[in-house]
Amino acid sequence: MACFCPLLTVEQLPTFVYHTTGPIIALPFDNTVTIRCEARGNPPPQYRWTKDDLDFIPPHPATIRSDQLATDGTFVLQNKSLARFQGKYRCYASNKLGTAMTETIELIVPSMPKFPKENIEPIVVDEGEPFVLLCNPPEGVPPRKIHWMSIGLQHIEQDERVSVGTDGSLYFSHALQKDSRQDYCCFADFLRIRTIVQKPGGTVVVVAGPPVRTPSLLLPSGVQTEKVLLKGAELQLECVPGGNPTPKIEWMKMGDELPARAKLDNFGKLLTIAAIEESDEGKYMCLAKNSAGQAVHYFDVIVEEPPKWLTEPPHSQLTVIGSDVHIKCSVSGKPQPDILWRKNGNIFEDNPLNNKRVLDDTLVLHNATPDDSGVYQCEAANRHGVVLGNINIMQNYKHFSSSSTLKISFLPSPRAKDETPETIEGERFVTLQNGSLQISSAEKKDSGEYVCVADNSEGKSSIMAVLAVKGITTKKENCSSITQLMCQAEFADAIMNVNLNDEGVYTCLARTRLDGVNRTALLTVLDVPDAPQNVEITELKDQRHILLAWVPGSDHNSSVIEFIVEYEESQWEPGKWKELHKVPGNQATAELALHGHLNYQFRVYAVNAVGPGPPSEPTERYKTPPAAPDRNPENIKIEGRLPHQMDISWEPLLPVEHNGPGLEYKVSYRKLAVDDTWTEHLIKRHSFVVRNTSTFIPYEIKIQSRNSHGWGPEPKIATGYSGEDVPTAAPRDVAVEVMNTTVLRVSWTPVPPATLRGHLKGYHVNKILDERHTLSFPGKRTHAIVPNLDAFSEYTLTVNVFNKKGNGPSSDPVTFNTPEGVPEQVPILTTSNAQKESIRLVWAPPLVANGILTGYLLQYHLINETTKEARDSWEMNITGPDTTHWQLEGLEEGSLYLFHLSACTRAGCGPPLAQESSDGNWRISKAVNASQSFHVIDGLNPGTVYTVRLMAKSLLDNASIFEDVIQTQVTGAAGQPRSISTKGWFIGTMCAVALLTLIVLTVCFMRRNQGGKYAVKEKEDLHPDEESQAMNDDTFCEYSDSDEKPLRGSSCSLNGDDAVGDGVSRDSLVDYADGGGEFSEDGSFIGEYSGHKRGGSVTEPNGFGPVSA
C-alpha cells in the first residue's frame, strides 16, 4: 500500500501586492485613467472603494470595468466624465480574517486654465518711480512658464531694472520714458498640457518726475518672511528692488556663510539652493542699495520633513493565543507625525479595561485572543504627508492537547458525487492513543480518502490522507501487513514556547513493507541578539574622545541591524541610561565625543529584526576632565512686549553640556547697520531684557556661553526687532468706486514704513451705516473689494493700518451712496372676493424696498388644471407705489389662475411672489352690532396669516366693504417670556396686596368721616371728567348707519371700559397690536401687520363655523 501526503490549505490575511499611489493628475489628452488595487489572501479578498470617505460604487460599465473590480480591484475611468470623479480614494481588501486598506489615492482633474475677464486700467507713473504689472496667472498643471510680450509677440526686454518675478508679475525698479506703451501682455504657458493662455494687454504712461529714488522692495512685502520647505526641495528667495538708480542686491546668511550650493539668478534677484538640508535652516537677508540709500528684508528658512519609517514598516506577526502582541510604529518627521491606529480599516480605540492599549507609537494586545486576529493599520501623518502600514496579526489556535476529540471518517475511491464521509468502524480499524489510524490486513476496498477531524474548546482542525492499496502478485502474507496513517492534530508552526534548543532538521518518515516516503523540514528559531561581550575603552587624541570596542554576541539567525551605545553619568542623573550613539550592525567599534567634567559608564546592545537584545555589562567608570563649553545656546527668541524694550530668551545648555562649573552667558547686542560696538552683559539666567530702546529698531544679537575654564565657540548672529507700538499715520487719498449696488472698491495710499512702528499685518476698512462693521485685509496692499453693502444707502468709510500691537489712526472719512437696487419679494399676496369674471388681489409692500418704489408688476396665467401648464399669460404694470390691492376683471369663469406680483423701483423689479386664484374656506361670525366699533375674533392659530373681511349683508352676496391681512403672534415662542400674570405666586401676591390696600383705605375713609365732609359732589358737577361722561352715555362709540367707512379709526377709547351692553370682550384690533396699530384712511391694516408685535389670544363666547366661499 502507499500513503500520499496531502496538500494543506493555509488561511491568509489580505496583503496588498500592488496599488496605485497618489496623487494622480488627469491630463486633458488622457483617454482613460486607471486606478489599480491588487491583494492576495486566502480566502481570496473582496474589494471595496471609498471616495472622500464615502462608499464608492461604480456607476455603470461604460466608465468603470466592474468585472475587474471583483477580481483585482482595478477600475478604469473614461476621460469624458472624469470631472465628477475628482476626489480622494481608498481601496479596502477583505476576507473573513480581516481587512487591509491603502493610503489615500487623490485624483485631481484640473480645469482648463484661463484668465478672468477684466478691464485693465492704464497705469500712470512718475519717471523714476517703481511700478509693477500684475499677471496673476491662473492655476493649472505644473510646470508653468510666464512670458511678457507685446501684441506682436515680441518679448519685453529684461535686465537688472526690468524682470519677471516668481509670481509672474513684471517688476520695474524705476520707470523710464521708453516704458510707455499700450501692449504689455502676459502669457502663461502650461507645458505639460500644451496650452498657452493670454491676459489682455495693459497700458503704461510715464510722466516726468524726480530722477533719484530711495531703494524699496517691490517683492516681498513687509520686513520679514517665513519660508517653510520640505527637506530635499529647492529653496527660492526673491528680492525685487525699486529705486533710481537701479539698486544692487546683496545676499547673506546671518551668522554663517551662504552654502556652496547657492546660486543667483534673474540678475541677482533670486537666490536658489537645490536639495535643501537641515543645515540650511536659518535667517537670510537681502540688501538693496543705491546711491540714495538701502532697504533690507529678512527670510526665516525652516526645513521640515513628511513622515517616513525610521527603519521599515512594522512586520506582520504569527502569535499564539494568550501571548502579548506589541506593534511598534516607528516614524520620524517634522513636525512630529500624529499616529492613528485602525483594525480592519476601522479606528482602533484605547481600551484599558479590555487590555487593548495604545501607548504613543506602540499598540499592545495583552493576553491576545482569536478575535484579535486581523489587519492592523498604522497611519502616521503631519501637514506634509502620510505613511500607512498594514500589519497582519494572526492568532494560531491549532494546538490540540490530550483533551481534544478526534473523529475519523472514510470516503471510498472511486466515490459517488456529493457522497458524505462514513465513520470508520470494524475490528480491523483501531484509533491509537496519539490519534493515528491503524488498519489491519489492508484490502483493496480500503483504498480511498480518510479525514481526521480534531476539535476542542479553542477550535477545530482537519487533515485528509489518501490510501492506495496496491495489488501484490507475490506472497499472500504481504496483504496481512499492518498500515498506520499518521493523524497528528499538532502542527510545526504551533509549537508552544519555542526555544533555541528546538532548532534542527526534522524528518517525517512513512514506511510500509511495500514502500516508503519521507519529508524533511528545517526549523530555524529567530531570537533577539545576545548581549555584546568584552566592552573596552581606548583613548584617542585626548581624554574626551574615546574608542569603544566590543565583541558581538550571537545574532540567532537574524542579522544585527545596529548597535546602540548608552551612557550613564553620576553627577546630574545617576542611574539613568541614555542613548549616546548608533553604529551599523557590521561594525563593532564606536568613536565617541564626550562632555567634560562627567563620570561616565557605557554599555552596548544589539538590535535585529526580532527586536533589541539585552545590554552588555557596563564598563568601569571613566571620568573626563573639565573644559570650556562646546556650544552656545540655540533657538534665540527676540520679542518686544513693550514699545521701548526688547526681550531676549534662549534654550539653555543641558547640565551635561556645562563641561565644568560656573556656567554663564554673555549677551551682546547692537543696532543693525548703525552701531559698530557691541553692548555686552554677563548673566546666569537664560533671558535678558534690553530697556529704553527705540521703537521697532532692528538689532543684531549673539549669545556666548562660558564657564570657569573658558569661553564657548564664536556665536552666530541672530536678528530681531525691539518692541512694537501702534502705527502713527493714517492711509491717505482714500477713494471709493461703487461697482454695483452691493460691492465697492476702495483704494488708498499706504502709510510710510517709518510710521508703521511694527510688522505690517494689514489694513482695516471700516464701513458705517447704522452701526460700524470692520473688514480686515492682510498684507501690503493699496486697494480692497468691500462686499455685502445695502442698496440705496449712505455709508461713511474709513481705512486704518494695523500691526501686532494694534490699529493706527483712521483716515479722513469718505461718504458715498449706493445706487438703487431691486426690491425684496412682497411678503404677502392673497386672492379673495372671487366673482364670475373678477377677483381681488391684496398684498403688502416689500419690507426692504432698496430704493423708491415706482409700482408693481403683475403677471397672471390661465392654468390647465390637468397638466398644470399655462394656457395663456398676461402682464400689467400697477404704477401706484402706495397701492396694496387690485380688482382684476375679464377673467374666465370657473378657471384656475396663477398670479405673480413683483415690487419695482427704477432699478427694476424684484423677485415675484406666486398665488393661485383659490378663494379658500371662510369662517363666518355672528352678526356684528352696527353701533359697535370693534369685534373680537378668537379660535385663530398662532403665527398664521389670515384675510379678514367685513361683509355688508352676507358672504353669499360678495359685498365686501372692508378687507385686510393680519398675522397672529406666535405664543410661547423661543425668546418671548411667558406673562408673569399667569404665574400662581404672582396672582396670590396681587390678591394679598389688594386686600391690604382695601383695609388701609377703609381705615382712612373712617378717619376722614370723623374729621368732616368735603364737597366732592359739587366739585365733580363743576368740572365733569370727559371719560366719566362717556361712560354715562347710553351707547359706546356709536356710529351712524349711513357712515360709509364704519371701521375708520375712532377717537373714543377702546380699552378697558366695563359698561358695554352686548357682553363681548372689550379689546379692539388696536389692542391686538399692542396699541401701536391704526387703520389707514381706506381701512387697510396691511401696513401694520408685520411691523408690530401682536398681543395674546382674545376670546369671544361664540366661535366660527366653516363656510365654503
Image (spheres, helix red, strand yellow):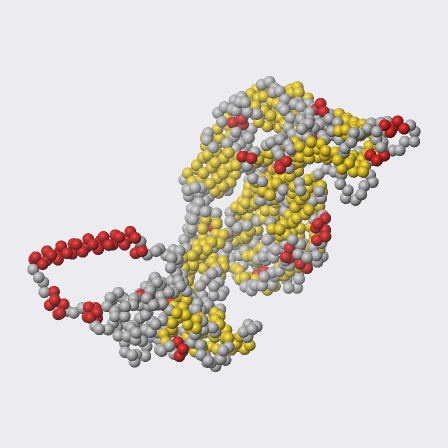
All told, the count of numbered labels is: 0
Q: Is residue 989 left or right of residue 112?
A: left
Q: Where is 223 relative to 582, above or below?
A: below
Residue at left 61%, top 40%? 343
Determine the residue located farthest toward the top in the rendered image.
620
Q: Is residue 1100 above or below residue 257?
A: below
Place residue 609 in its image quadrant: top right
**Residue at 78% in and 38% down:** 411
- Image: 144 above or below 936: above
Q: Residue 897, how many percent across, how many down? A: 50, 75
Rendering coords of residue 42 (x, y %) = 71, 41
Left or right: 710 as drawn, with respect to 854: right
Q: Nearer the viewer, residue 685 or 248?
A: 685
Could you say where residue 563 lies in the image, as x and y percent from the top left? 65, 27
Could you tell me if residue 273 is visible in this image? no
- Which quadrant of the rendered structure holds the C terminus? bottom left
Q: Is residue 691 among the parts visible in the rendering?
A: yes
| Front residue of 798 and 156 | 798
Which residue shows up at 63% across the image and 42% down it? Answer: 344
Vertical relation: 566 (above or below) 132: above
